[in-house]
Image (cartoon, rainbow, N blue to C red):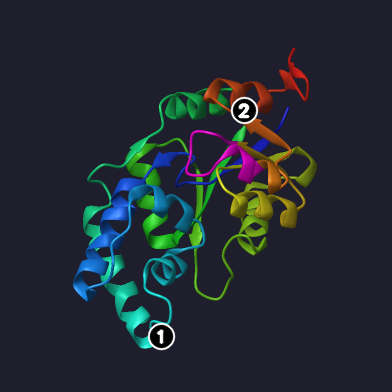
Amino acid sequence: MYTHVIFDLDGTLLNTIQDLARAGNHVCALHGWPEHPVETYKTMVGNGAAKLVERFAPAGTPQEVLAQALNEFSLWYDQHKEDTTAPYDGMPQLITRLNRAGVGTAVLSNKPDFMAGPVVERYYPGLFPVVQGAVDGLPIKPDPALALRLMERMSARRETTLFVGDSDVDMATARAAGLEGCGVLWGFRTRQELEQAGAAWLAETPGELEQLILGERTKEGTV
C-alpha cells in the first residue's frame, strides 16, 4: 500500500485537451500560422505552456514572437479553460475513497501555480489538500525539484509514495524523484510511450489504480 500519491493534472485528473487545443489554435489564427488537430496537441502538452507554444508555432519563430504568443495563449486559456474541461470518469470518486482510506493525495502540475490550485478546486472541491504548480525560480517537470518540494509539504517518504501521470514527462519525473511511476491509459499518451518511459505500473481504469494504491494488485494482476 502507498501512503501518499502525487497526481499529474492534465490527462490524469482532468481532460483538458479540447480547451488547450482551442487556445493554441486561437493563437495560431492570430498569427496566420497553420492550426493543429486535437490529436496533435496530445503530443505537444506536458512540458508547460512555454514549450507548448514553441511546439505549435512554426519552426524558427523568433523568441520575441514566441513570448507574445505565450501571453496571448495564457490570456485566452485563462478565459476559456472551463469550456469543455471535465474530470475523467471515476476519478473524483477514487480520490474520495483514497482520502477516506487515509492515503495522502496531492497534485503536481506544470500549469502556473496561481492557476493550478483554482482549477483543481473547481473540479475536485476539498479533495486535494496540497496542489503544486509551476513557480518562478524552480524548474518544472521532469526535473524533480517541485516533486521533492511537494513531498516535503506532505511529509511523504520515497518508498511509500506513488507518482501517477499520463506521459513520459511524468514517468521521468517519478524516476528523477526516486519514486515508482504509474502510467494511466485514459490520458493523452499511449501505452507504448509509457512503457518506453519506464512506467513501473500501468492502469487502464481508476479501479485498477485504486487496487494498486491500496496494495490489492501485484505485477501479475490483482490479489
Q: Nearer the viewer, residue 116 or 35?
A: 35
Q: Is residue 61 magenta?
A: no
- The magenta stretch is 184-194
Q: Nearer the viewer, mark 2 or mark 1?
A: 1
**Could you tell me which residue is drawn at 68 percent across and 54 percent down?**
172
Q: CA distance from mark 2 to mark 1?
A: 47 Å
Q: Earlier in the sequence, mark 2 or mark 1?
A: 1
Q: Position of residue 3 (x, y in %)?
A: 69, 34
Which residue in the protein does label 1 denote? 63
Vertical placement of residue 40 versus 145, above or below: above
Can you tell which quarter of the image residue 126 is in? top left
Is any atom of residue 20 visible in this view?
yes
* Mark 2 residue type: Gly
Q: Are marks 2 and 1 in contact (CB under 8 Å)?
A: no
Vertical placement of residue 46 versus 156, above or below: below
**Could you tell me which residue is drawn at 48 percent across and 39 percent down?**
187
**Could you tell me which residue is drawn at 41 percent across and 85 percent down?**
63
* Mark 1 residue type: Gln
Q: Position of residue 101 (x, y in %)?
A: 60, 23
Quadrant containing the N terminus in the rendered view: top right
Q: With 40 as the anchor, is 183 left or right in this view?
A: right
Quadrant containing the C terminus in the rendered view: top right
Q: Is residue 190 magenta?
A: yes
Q: Which mark is residue 102?
A: 2
Q: Which mark is residue 8?
A: none
